[in-house]
Image: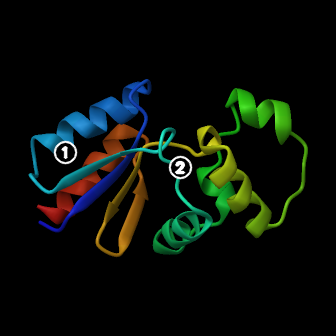
Amino acid sequence: MKDIIIWHNKTCSTSRKVLELMQGQTKSLQIREYLKNPPSIVEIADVLHMMGQEPSYILRKKDKVFQELYTGKILSNKEWISAMSKNPSIIERPIIIIGDKAYLARPFDAFVKWFSQFK
């Protein structure tokens, strides 16, 4: 199996479940605690490209920081990506990167089905 990267938040139960599943399936797992080590603008743009998605797809709109700073704001895609890089808590999690593919691993059951293609 290719190297796997997880953008992980240890306080998130879904992120912990996904990590636990992957740790049992692969030895080539890199855990990135993205709140401590925020992704750059380029990394976020790359992940969105791999997903074929717009920034709104990975925005965590229920996050306290999002609520305080961004609720009701209309930003360009570049501005949203910059906001996510500056405020990583507004990035939905966990995000899994395998080769040139990335996936927002929620809901958990949908992730399990997606992840099974790499076994």
On screen, 81 above or below 7?
A: below
Task: Mark 2 vs mark 1: give the one in front.
Answer: 2
Which disc is residue 38 wearing?
Answer: 2
- Check if mark 2's residue and mark 1's residue have beta carbons within 8 Å: no
Q: Secondary structure at mark 2?
A: loop
Q: How many marks?
A: 2
**Residue at horizontal 59 percent and vertical 46 percent from the top:** 91
Whole-number angstrom distance, CA of label 2 to CA of label 1: 22 Å
Earlier residue among tags 2 and 1: 1
On screen, 63 above or below 88?
A: above
Q: Quadrant of residue 85?
A: bottom right
**Quarter holding the N terminus?**
bottom left
Q: Secondary structure at mark 1?
A: helix
State the residue position of label 1: 22
Amino acid type indicated by mark 2 = Pro
**Residue at horizontal 83 percent and vertical 30 percent from the top:** 68
